[in-house]
Image (cartoon, rainbow, N blue to C red):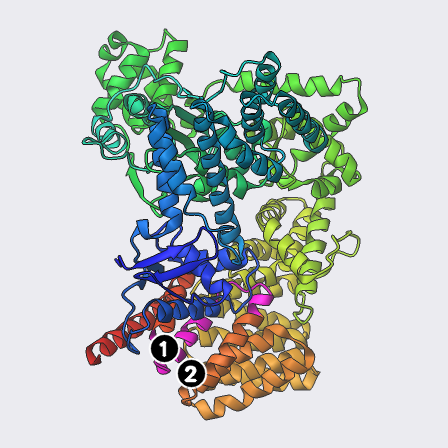
Amino acid sequence: MSDSLSIGLLGPVTGAHDGVAFDLGPARQQAVLVMLVSPPGRVVTMDQLVEGLWGEKPPASAGQSVYTYVAGLRRTLEPGRRPGERSKLLISKAGGYQLLVEPHKVDAFAFSELVNAALRARGTGAHEEALRLFDEGLGLWRGVALSGVTGPFAETERAVLDELRLVAFEGRSELLLHQGRAGEAIATLRELAARHPLRERLHELLILALGRSGRQAEALRAYEDVRVSLAEELGIDPGQGLREAHRVVLAGDRASVRVAAETVPRQLPRELIGFVGRAQETDRLAALLAPRDDVPPHPLVVISGPPGVGKSALAVRVAHAVRDRFPDGQLYVGLRGSTPNVPRLSAHGLAGRLLRGIGTPREDVPAELDEAAAMWRSRLHGRNLLVVLDDASGLDQIRPFLSTPLGVSVLVTSRESLNVGDDCVQLRLGRLSEAEATTMLSKLAGDGRVGADPAGTSTLVRLCDGLPLALRIAGARLADHPEWSVGTLGRRLADQRRRLHELAAGDLAVRSSLAASYDGLTGGSRPVDRLAAGALPLLGRLHVPDMTADVAAVLLDRTPDEARRALDRLAEANLIERTGDGRHQLHDLVRLFAGDLPVRHPEKPLLRVLGYFAASARQANVVIDPHRVQLGRPVDEATSRAFATPEEALAWLRAEEHVLNAVAVQALSSPDDGIAELGVRLTFAMLWHQQRSHEGHDMLTLNTMALRVCERLGDDAGAQIAHGHIANGLRLTGRPEEGIPHLEAELAIARRLGDGFGQMRVLGNLSNAYVARQLYEQALPHAEQQLAVARQIGSEVGVRFACLMLGTARQGMGHHAQARDPLELALAAARRSGDTTHEGHARVVLSQVLLDLGDPELSLEHVSEGMKLLGRTGYRFMVECLITMSRACRMLGRLDEALAHATEAVANAESGGNALWERRADAELTAVREAMGAADREA
């Protein structure tokens, strides 16, 4: 940790060693530094750096650029470091980078701490000390924070710092007014109010300062100005604080001033009466949230475990036990992350709940998520608050709200492991012991009843599997049936076919409630009521996680506007849920209810929407990469969605892939031949997207189902395609040997049907499968046969692929010089035709050949360009590229870059689920570490 290094963010970004400034380089290099010290000491991963610099659409060279910026910072921060010597300040750690700098040497951190201390002092009545701390903190500012630094992270961090600066100015002004020094606050408040015309608190303080200084007319003019601005810009009236300030000025009351009266929320649900056990877990959690000796509470505590195990009940119990440690209140938000068939609470919805919970008026909650999260963090300074986030679906749902100041604790429950969260301590909750489960059942059903049948109780407890939820339902069933013994219910649950049915309650009440809502629509007087009533039975026929209005329009055979109005009306009736981004979701119980409603010709809406999805998926792939061959029959009669650009087509496929998969499964499972056949077409239309996304498991599952449908329908041409796609899915999932029989079956059908192109294609895929198995001698003849057939039938794409396979096979056999010629032929042909995908693959394989021929510089050029080209068409699995880049950098002695590439390769391989590539990536990472160790020993 360096005590001599200081970093300035509250103005132009600066750096100094012992007070001597140094040049931090270009703006993006400065942006990397900003991420490394916001807050100081954190580990920033490569993905976070790329996203922070470029957002959701980074260039293909983003990773390489980051390595360049990190290397530049290392040279700047440690000018005396020898070549090959590891950096002692900017270190590689846990898949990312960490800058070892004392936190108080970063002015933004020091400012935050000073404001935090000032707010605490103000809360205890130490107004002079609070004013001194505010002045000291504000004195650190030198201009616009992060001046000249761009990128999403910098913009967000600038907003956080600006918001905290405003909080400090407001706090300082409040204290000046409280001390009778209103005149000293006017100039600053007037300037800030002009810059922030819609920030009500600033205007409120300005009005009070003017009023207390005897300038009533100016105060009333200031109120009128902000009232007009709020009305014209937002269509709202002034809030309570502004109205009260106006009243004070009108009354001529110079003594009235509001000094930050904070809302103290008490939102915890009550504890469950039937709660039992969990003593050890309760003690451990309480020790984290209410530690002794003035140690601050842990910032993030997670309770994870299987569904029904009692995570929420334990969280509420612990929150009540430690609530006195959090005098500024307790917030509680149910996130609905795993509530069956109910959409989870969106991140922006969570932002609104949290901000309103600490007193932020609804109209002041920012529309942008980043701004809302920044406001949340800023307004927590000086508070001791407990936040319970119940049933999180994962870190993504809650991540913007976890970077809280010390003194604020977030207690999360989730079925998912959230261990990777910063500063996370996670407790995994197991099932109740038999003794605890028996005690719980006794509380719910009565001691006498449970004690009268110990054998039956033991059976019932065992069948409930130690799950509090199951025990609670069992207790409710026994309460509803006093004539049953505990053993009676145990015997009913013993039948596995009936167990879940018995462990349920309230279905009839739910059904009657849904029926009442539906009847209200069918009997409604407005046309939109009847439109919505007609839509619900059709929506229940489509088994998808969610849908857009465009999809609903096709399903309903209505215009998009009519479909949108129907969905909106159903949402108003609480029969569907809005999930954000223009999507809607049916609760599963609603879907079951809707599916039982009568529909004339129920197959027609399914055929329409299947045709739309199949045609749109096919067209999207054509727009993304027109050189790829689309197999299977097109859906001529369907109206495809139009795509203006490859980026739009790729975004649609990524947004809809979970829906496309669900629709395909539903169609392929249908006994209706027409629906099932359209499911086959949709499955085939998704091939190239699945390949680019490395979704081998989805490809394998859907095409296995498609093969069964084709065999049922006697569709030999479809079966031929399905066999090939199954083999491809097996190759992508690391099981190429299992795909060989499918490729041989595909070849046999192609020969029987006289399909020359199909024969040529499968020969190439056989070569690829043998390459994946590292059986290069067997791959070579298939590639040679493909080349001959491709030239015979005049298939340019086949010639290019065959040359790729020839080069790859020869490279694998160690014939590096002979491998170069076909790869350069493939590259030249791909460039002539504009085939980006084949050009990218050719460059990647050629880079490996060049490495083995001793030319790492040219190899690095080819693989970098190849990775960029493949990324442009949506390829996500880049392990081969990253390993090659690591090898090239290792040969060039650029070991820090090699380590970064190898580390990213390991992560990419693990995400792809391919054991072979995981082993290769691990081997390269080991080689890099050994090289670094050798370099250290030589140094």
Of residue 635 and residue 518, the one placed in the foreground of this image is 518
Disc 2 residue crowd, few under 14, some 14–19, many 20+, Cα 10 Å: many
Indicate yes or no whether the magenta region holds residue 495.
no
Q: Secondary structure at mark 1?
A: loop
**Which disc number belongs to residue 421?**
none
Residue at image position (72%, 55%) is 615
Q: Position of residue 544 (x, y in %)?
A: 60, 41
**Which disc number belongs to residue 894?**
1
Residue at image position (20%, 29%) is 280
**Residue that numbered label 2 is attached to:** 812
Type of residue at label 2? Gly
* Residues shaded magenta: 870-895
> Which quadrant of the rendered structure holds the C terminus?
bottom left
Q: Position of residue 254 (x, y in %)?
A: 52, 16
Indicate yes or no whether the magenta region holds residue 887.
yes
Q: Position of residue 817 (x, y in %)?
A: 46, 92
Residue 587 appearing in the image: no
Disc 1 residue crowd, few under 14, some 14–19, many 20+, Cα 10 Å: some
Q: Secondary structure at mark 2?
A: helix
143 lies left or right of 668: left
792 lies left or right of 513: right
Q: Position of residue 305 (x, y in %)?
A: 34, 36
882 lies left or right of 642: left
Total marks shown come to 2
Principal secondary structure, stretch drawn in magenta? helix
Residue 447 appearing in the image: yes
Q: Quadrant of residue 429?
A: top left
Distance, label 1 to label 2, CA atoms, is 26 Å
Type of residue at label 1? Arg
Q: Quadrant of residue 74?
A: bottom left
